Image: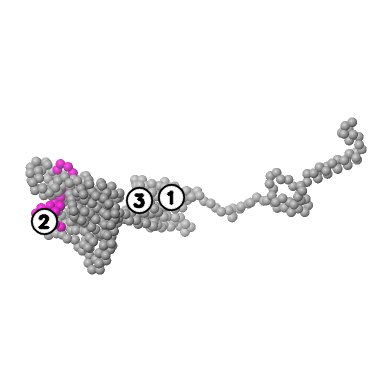
Amino acid sequence: MSFGNRFKQLPKQHRTFILVIFGLIITLLFLPVSTSAPQSSDAGSFYIYQIGDRYSLKLPTITTSANKPVKTRLNSKEIIVKSGDNLSLIGKRGHLSAKTIYEIDRLASAKRLRNIYPGQKLTITTNDAGQFMGLIYPYSATESLYINKTSDGYVANTVKSKIEIREQFARADITSNFWNAGVKANMPAKQIMNLATIFGWDIDFALDIRAGDSFAVIYEEQFIDGDFVSTGNILAAEFINQGDKFQAVRNNDGSYYTPSGRSMRKAFLRAPVNFKYISSSFNRKRRHPVTGKVRAHNGIDYAARTGTPIVSAGDGKVIASAYNRFNGNYVFIKHNTNIVTKYLHMNKRTVKQGQRVKQNQKIGTVGATGRVTGAHLHYEFLVNGKHKNPKTVSLPKADSLRGNEKTKFVAKAKGIIKQLESNAKLYGSIAL
C-alpha cells in the first residue's frame, strides 16, 4: 500500500497534526541566519520582517516648483551684415521684436550700430522664450559693443581687448623691385607702403630704386589672445639707395626723424602718385608719342591705373583746375612765392581753383584725358617759372628737433639704430 493511501486512512486529527508539523519544518528551513533588517532593498533579496525590527523606507525625491532651479537655455545667432542692412533688418533676422529693436536703438552707445557695413558680424542671444538677452558687435579689431538686458533695462558697454605688441625685424636686398623685396621679407603689405611713405621725401620709388639697394626695418605687430589683428608702427628703418644711406626713427609725437633729430618730412614729396612704373622721364629732347615731333618734356610721366589717387606734392593754393584738349583735366598748385607744381591728364579733379591744400591731400585721380596714349600722370615742377627735374630738384631742408626734446630723441635713436644695424648684420642678405 502506498504512503498516500495510508495517510488517508489515518484519523482526521492525526492528519492535521502531521501537516502542521511538516509546515513548521519547511518554514524553519527557509529562514535567514541573520535577524537584522537589511539596509537596502536590492532586487532579488528576501527578508521576513518581524515585530521589533527597525528599517528605513526609501522614499522618492520630490522637488517642488518653489525650490527647483530654473535653467534657461540661451540661443546665440551670428548675423553677417549685408548690403543695405540696418538695425531693424538685422534685429528681424535675429528674431527680435519691434519694441526690443526700438529700445536698443534708443541707447546712446548703440549709435555705432547705425554705421555698420557689409561683412561685419553681430551676435544676438535670446532665451527659449525668444526674449532678447544680449548683443555683441565687434566694430573694430580691438573694440566691441556689448548690449545686455537686465532687470533694470538695457545696458551698453564698450569692451576693449588687451593688445599684445610684438616687435618684428625684416631686411632685404632688392634685385627686381622694392615691392617684391618687401613681400619676400614677409612684411605685411601695409608696412611695405608705410616704409615707402617714410622715405618718400628723399627717394622717388619709381625712378630711384636700383638692383643692389637694400632696406632694414623694425616694426610692430598687434596680437589679441595670440592671434594677429593688425600692423603697428614702424619704429626704425634704414634704406640704402644707390650707395646713399637714409635712416629714420619714430619719435613720441608720431613723426619720423633722422638719428640726429632732423625731420624726414620735407616741403615736397618726390612722387605725387602711387605709381606702377615710369613711362617717361624728364627729357629736353623727347619725341612726342602722338605727334612724333621732338619737343622738351618738362616733367615726369607716372603710368598708373586709371583712378589711382593723385596727391599734392606740398602745401599750397590751387591756382588752376580746368580742362583743355591738350592737358585734359589738369590742376596747378602754387606752393610759395616761387614754386608751382602741375598735374596733367587726370581722370577726375577733386579740388577747385582758389582752394588751399595740404601735402599728401588728394587732388584727383590718374586718367588718360587730353593728348595722351595711355593712362598716366604728367607731373611738372617749376621754380621761378622755370622747369626743374622733379627727381633731382633741391628741396627745402627739413625742420629739426630742438632743446631737451632733441637730446632725449638722439639718445633713444642711438640705441634703436644700433639694434637695427646689429640685426641687419646678423640677419644677413636675402636674395630676392
Residue 95, x across and y down, in percent: 44, 47
**Range shown magenta:** 372-395
Residue wearing tag 1:
124
Q: Could you say whether the residue bearing mark 2 is in a helix, strand or loop?
A: strand
Q: Tell whether position 388 is magenta.
A: yes
Q: Residues within 10 Å of mark 1 (few under 14, many from 20)?
A: many
Is residue 395 visible to us here? Answer: yes
Residue wearing tag 2:
383
- Alpha carbon of mark 3 to alpha carbon of mark 1: how far? 15 Å
Q: Marks 1 and 3: in contact by CB < 8 Å? A: no
Is residue 332 visible to us here? Answer: no
Q: Could you say whether the residue bearing mark 1 is in a helix, strand or loop?
A: strand
Residue wearing tag 3:
116
The three-letter amino acid code for the residue at tag 3 is Ile
- Alpha carbon of mark 2 to alpha carbon of mark 1: how far? 62 Å
Residue 49, x across and y down, in percent: 76, 49
